[in-house]
Amino acid sequence: MTVLVIIPTYNEIESLPRQLDGVRAIAPDVDIVVVDDDSPDGTGRWADDRAATDEHVFVLHRAGKQGLGAAYLAAFAWALERDYDVVVEMDADGSHRPEDLPKILAEAEHYDLVIGSRWVPGGSVVNWPSYRRYLSTHANRYVRLALGVPIRDATAGFRSYRTGTLRQLALAQVESQGYCFQVDMAWRVLLAGGSVFEVPITFVERDAGASKMNGAIVREALVKVTWWGMQRLCGVSRIDPSRRR
């Protein structure tokens, strides 16, 4: 099973070196592609230097800050061109621990989408303020109610996809950003009849850099999930419950 770990970056010069070192140590056979949105702090240049000395590290440069969803879609296309079997989404800031990666990869052989979940038994968050915990748990509860999905952590960004499944999805139609992108992709996998599984992880709040969370990201997710929920109620979008897991 050939695996590509995708790490989007924008001003992650403080945390990216530790994250790359952690992934390389825990999973030395996987490849990593850093997708940098022209970080003014030099993250992209540092990644280029690392790639020049590590055959498992690659860099995609994009002109300006174009958003998380667009970064992942560019990396998906890059992975599909090179026939990887599995792609993994992973943050650069250390919140996604490399030591949880083997658990996700073990299930990636059996499921189309594997989510590293904070909100299943055994999952946890560390150093999160109460308002972030409240926002995440209630957002995921709303997703479950609106879309009728069994996923406990649909907004989670630590996850793997089989590339065979990605090839079946209309990725060119995906316009969501931020946490809504994660819900959008999970919803599309389920609508396509794909299988989803959640493994418990420990999510650690970043200790370097700045969070990209803002009001626009929350509003986008609320509006789009509500719209998809309305489509579901009208019978436009239906999931076969026998193929959810």
Image (cartoon, rainbow, N blue to C red):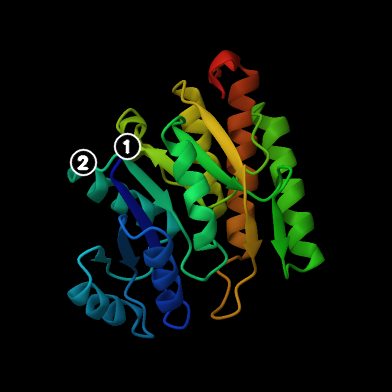
| Quadrant where the C terminus is found in the figure | top right
Q: Position of residue 117 (x, y in %)?
A: 63, 47
Label 2 belongs to which residue? 83
Q: Relative to the observer, which residue lies in front, 39 or 86?
A: 86
Mark 1 and mark 2 residues within 8 Å of each other at the beta carbon: yes
On the rendered structure, is 159 left or right of 119? Answer: left
Q: Secondary structure at mark 1?
A: helix
Which of 230/240 is in front?
240
Between the C-alphas of marks 1 and 2, the distance is 8 Å
| Left or right: 154 as drawn, with respect to 110 | right
Residue under the point 30% across and 61% down: 33
Q: Residue at x 73, y 70 (%)?
A: 127
Relative to 58, is 222 above or below? Answer: above
Q: Nearer the viewer, residue 173 or 161?
A: 161
Local SS, label 2:
loop
Q: Where in the figure is residue 195, as x and y percent of width and height?
A: 50, 26
Residue at 23% from the left image edge and 76% from the top image edge: 48
Figure quadrant of residue 13: bottom left
Judging by the rendered image, the residue that carries numbered circle 1 is: 163
Question: Hey, which quadrant is residue 47 in on the image?
Answer: bottom left
Closer-to-camera residue (38/88): 88
Mark 1, Cα crowd under 10 Å, few <14 / some 14-19 / many 20+, is many
- In the rendering, at what x and y percent does residue 244 appear? 56, 23
Disc on the earlier residue, 1 or 2: 2
Q: What amino acid does circle 1 point to?
A: Thr
Up/down of 110 relative to 98, above or below: above
**Residue 23 seen in this snapshot:** yes
Tell me where residue 219 appears, x and y as whole percent: 63, 53
| Residue with the most extreme bottom position | 41
